[in-house]
Amino acid sequence: MPETAIHDDPSTGSGTGAGTGAGSGTVTGPFEKTPGWLDWYDGPSKPAFELPAGSVDAHCHVFGPGAQFPYAPERKYTPCDASADQLFALRDRLGFARNVIVQATCHGADNRALVDALGRSDGRARGVATVRRDVTGEQLAELHAAGVRGVRFNFVKRLVDRIDTASLDEIVAKIAPLGWHVVIYFEAEDLPELYDFFRGIPTDVVVDHMGRPDVSKDPDGPEFGLFLRFLRENPNVWTKVTCPERLSVTGPAALAGEQHAYRDVVPFARRVVEEFPDRVLWGTDWPHPNLKDHMPDDGLLVDFIPQIAVTAELQQKLLVDNPLRLYWPELSREGA
Ligand code: 0GY
């Protein structure tokens, strides 16, 4: 690893109790955390970057608490609990106005923790659910009333068993009339195989984490080129320019006051923000499932934003206008 490599220091991850409340590290109910699990960072710094008014954290999760909302039997990992109250405390600490809470695979298609969090958000959270092909119109209507506006299809092999695309087509046919969109999570090496299926989705499509590019490769090379082509040729496709802490190879990590974290991710994310300014979203990814090297300070993650959206206009689109258009069209300037 180069000298600037991200350090493996789980001790930075928890326990101060200073910011988002006690609880980082605990898992309740009959559960034990996956060995080596890194807990979310308790007591994040106040960002130096001042978020535009009305900013949306458009990718985050809730985990359990397990005693109340049990983790799914088919899960591939067991996290520490990360409750809605803790998420909303983080929202306020960082200066966000709203959240988009994405169903995490550790809850399978049991959306109860998500729905509970939406119900306690005072309308300041929307959701992206996981549903199965046999979901009924009544269940979808209930999810919609709770604030769900999309479904997530996950193709990351370490997270889920493969689902055939025929059943996903059935789900798309059910959710499209509600005006929902589809969030897709996949790794860059799998895009060629999935390309045609993705292109056939008729609703808006939102890609998680820029399709997980290998940032040790050239941003002008064929792998990221295919992803850029996907966006260029399909105006219904959006992407989250999220998770530098997951994608970075060289760091440095967003810890200990670092103001220029994850430099190797910047050329990729900045490129996307500048070419597709009206189809990008940003989120913390709190509580950051399955990180292996370190757990970022979420305040310093917010300070990553001006590295990839370098003007006030781009920041306004990324953090306010775009997520409102997708999740709160009734509040959106363009939707008004
Ligand atoms: C993320 C990334 C991950 C996990 C999940 O639903 C999930 O379990 O999304 C991951 O492990 O890469 O977006 O939180």
Image (cartoon, rainbow, N blue to C red):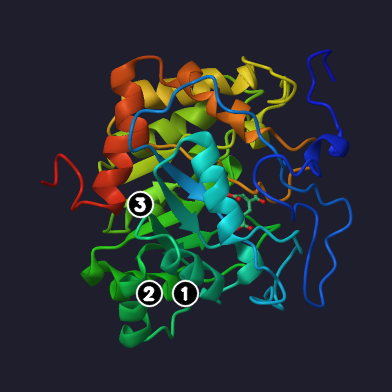
Q: Nearer the viewer, mark 2 or mark 1?
A: 2
Q: Secondary structure at mark 3?
A: strand
Secondary structure of residue under mark 2: helix
Q: Quadrant of residue 45?
A: top right
Q: Which residue is mark 2?
A: 143
Residue located beneath label 1 in the image: 131
Q: Tell me the crowding category of disc 1: few under 14, some 14 to 19, or many 20 or more residues within 10 angstroms, Cα based.
A: many
Where residue 319 sits in the image (x, y, percent)? 37, 34
Q: Are marks 2 and 1 in contact (CB under 8 Å)?
A: yes
First of labels 1, 3 by sequence position: 1
Side of 321 relative to 57 (left or right): left
Q: Earlier in the sequence, mark 2 or mark 1?
A: 1
Give the CA distance from mark 1 to mark 3. 16 Å
Q: Residue at x 78, y 35 (%)?
A: 294
| Residue 103 position in % (x across, y down) | 53, 63
How many residues crowd mark 3 within 10 Å: few (<14), some (14–19), many (20+)?
Answer: many
Mark closer to the observer (3, 2): 2
Q: Is residue 17 left or right of residue 146?
A: right
Q: Is residue 257 above or below residue 291?
A: above
Question: Where residue 289 appears, x then y in whole percent?
Answer: 69, 51
Query: Would you place residue 222 above or below residue 76 in this image?
Result: above
Q: Which residue is mark 3?
A: 205
